Amino acid sequence: MALATPASHGATTAASLTTQLTGAKRDIRGRAVEAVLLATLALSLLILVALVVNLVQRSWPVLSGRLGDFLSSGLDASNATEAGVWQAIRGTLTLAVIVAIVAFPLGIACAVFLEEYAGKSFFARLIRINVRNLAGVPSIVYGILGLTIFVKFADGITGGRTVISGGLALAVLVLPVVIITASEALRAVPQSIREGAYGVGATKWETVRSHVLPSAAPGILTGTVLALSRAAGEAAPLLLVGGITGLLRTGDQGLWEQITKGGFTSMPVAIFSYARQTGADFQAVTGAASLILLILVILINALAIWLRNRFEKQW
Amino acid sequence: MTTAMSNKWDAGQLRLSSGRRRSDTRMRWVFTAAGVTTLLITLLIIYTLFKDAWSFFWNVPKADLWTIGWFPRRGMYDIKTLFVGTLMVTGVAMLIAVPLGLGVAVYLAEFARPRVRKFLKPIIEVLAGIPSVVIGYFAISFINPNVITWLVGGANKAFNIASAGAAVGILTIPIIASVTEDALRAVPMSLREASFGLGARRVPTTFRVVLPASISGVVAALILGVSRAIGETMVVAIAAGAVGGGLFSTDLFQPGQTMTAAMAALGFGSDQVAGDGLAFQSLFFIGFLLFMMTLVLNVLGDRLVRKVREEY
C-alpha cells in the first residue's frame, strides 16, 4: 500500500491521516445534512409509532370492556354498543379464499408464460407493459369493472352483489402483484436448472413443472402472500361491488346460501362504515376494528418475510 | 432401449410419445391464455369505462359540468370541484411525502450501515402495508385533532382536505422511498469511489454525483407517488368529508371532494345511484378521467425507471 508508513515516522493512525487530508476542519455541513436525513427517517418511524399508540388508546374502551362481545357481534353502524366485526372477519376470510383460488393460478400461469414461453417477442413485451400498468390502476377503477362485469353482466353466475363478485374484483386487483412477484422468482432460477432438464430429454412443460416451478416456489409463495395482504386491506372496489356498510342481517342463512345470495362485508368496509359515525363510542369501535385489521395484515406480511428468509435460495 | 444393441439409430426414437407431446402443446396454450387474459382485463376496463363515460358526456347538459359544486343527485356535475379537490389533496400529500420519502431513501441507500439498513428497511415496508382505511381513521382521530388543529389554531372542520392530504402523504412515503432507493442503488460504486478519490466527502458525493446520476429514477419516484396519491380513495372518503357532494372550495381546512371519493360515494350505501341515470353514468365519466390521468403518469414513471436501469 502506498500510504503505509515506515515505523520511523511514528504512529500514523487513520484519524491523523484524515486530519492531514482535511486540514483539521470538522465536516460540520456534512454532519448537519446527515442529521437532517436521519430526522426524516426518525419522523417516518414516529408516524408509525403514533399510529399504533393512537389506535390502542382510542380502542381501549372496547378492548378492555367488551372484546369478546365485539369479536362476536355483527355489523351495525347505528348502535356502537352492539357493533362488532365477526361478519367482517368472515367476509375478509371468504374474500381471501376466492382471491387465492382465482388470482394465484392465473397470475402464476401468466408469469410462467412471460418468463418461460414468450421470450422477447412483441406480444410478450406488450403483456409486460400491460401488467405493469394494471399494477398502477387506482383500486376504485377495479370497483367499476367489478360492478359492470361481475355484478351486472355475470349476474347469473355470481349472484349479483355477493361476496363472489367482491372476491373476483379483488382477484383482478391483485393479479398484477402476483404476476410481477412470480416473474421475478422465475427469473431468478438459473438457466442451468432448465438445461439439466432439457439434457435428459424433458419437454418444456416437464421442465417447468418438475424443475423451474419447484425451484421458484418460495419466491412465488412470498408474492402470493403479499397479494393476500393487499386484498385483505382493500375497501374501495368492494364499496362499488356492494359491500354492506350500514347494517348486515345474515339471519339464519346457511354458509353456502350466504356466499351465493346474501350481502357481504369485510374488515376494511366495516372500518369505513364505523369511521363515518360520530361520537367517542364509534371512535373506539373504529379503532378496535382498525387495530385488528392492522395486526392481521402485519402478521400476513411477517409470514411473507419469514418465508422469504427461510426458503430463499442462493444459487 | 435396444438402440445401442441393434446399433441402428433413427431420428424416430428421439421423437416424443404422442401423449407427452400433446400435454406439452396443451400447456403452452394454457399459459398463453393466461397471458392473454391480462390484456383482456385492460380492454374490459377501457371498454366499460369508455362506453358509459361517452354516453354521459353526450347526454349531460354542458352547463351542468361547470356549476357551483359536485351534487350528482341534483344534476350538478361540476368537474372543477373534483379536480381542485384532487389537486389539493395531492399537493398536501406531496408536501409530506417528498421530503420524507427522499430523505429516507437517501439515508438508507447512502448513509446507513448495512446492519442498520437491514433492520430499518422492513419497518418502512410495514408502513407500505398499512391498509388505507386504517390511515384514514388515523387522519380523523389523530392528524386532524392533534396536528392540523394545532397548526391553524382551530380554524379547521372535523373533516377537511388538509388532514386527508397529510394521511395520503403518509401512504405515499414508502412508494417514493423505495423507487428512489432502487434508483440510488443502481448507480455503480465506481462513481462514488471516483468522487471519494478526488477528496469529496460523503455529502457532496451524494448530492453532486449520486443524485444527478440517478435523477430520472428520482423523478420517476415523484411521478409514481403523485399517481398513487391521485388514485387513493378510502383515506379521502373517510377524512375529507363531503360524502354526498360538495360546493366548489379552495379552502384546505374545509371539507372537500376528490374524484376518487366522489366515485366511492356514488357507488355505496345510502348514496347508491341505481339504474342508468346520468348520475350513475357520471361514475364512469370520472373513472375514465382518473384512469387516463394515472395511466399517463404510470407510463411516464415506468419509462424513467427503466431508463436508470439501462444506463448502468
Image: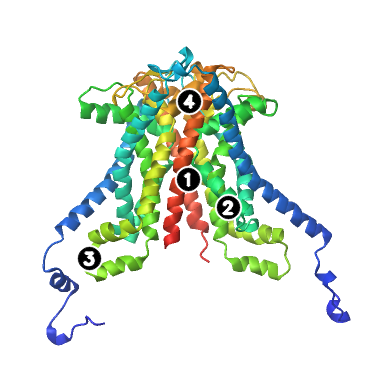
Instruction: Using the rendered image of the protein, determine whether residue B86 is visible from the camera's viewpoint.
Output: yes
In percent of width and height, residue A61 lies at: 36, 25
Label 4 belongs to which residue? B263
Q: Is residue A74 visible?
A: no
Q: Chain of mark 2?
A: A
Secondary structure beneath label 2? helix
Q: Quadrant of residue B280?
A: top right
Instruction: State which quadrant residue A250 falls in.
Output: top right
Q: Residues within 10 Å of mark 2 (few under 14, many from 20)?
A: some
Residue A154 at x, y percent in the picture: 67, 28
Q: Which residue is mark 1?
A: B299
Q: How far apart are labels 4 and 2 at the CA level?
A: 33 Å
State the separation of the CA atoms marked 2 and 1: 14 Å
Q: Position of residue B79 (x, y in %)?
A: 42, 24
Q: Amino acid at mark 4?
A: Met
Q: In this view of the protein, which residue sits in the foreground, A79 or A3?
A: A3
Chain ID at mark 3: B
Mark 2, residue position: A125
Could you tell me which quadrant the N terminus of chain A lies in? bottom left
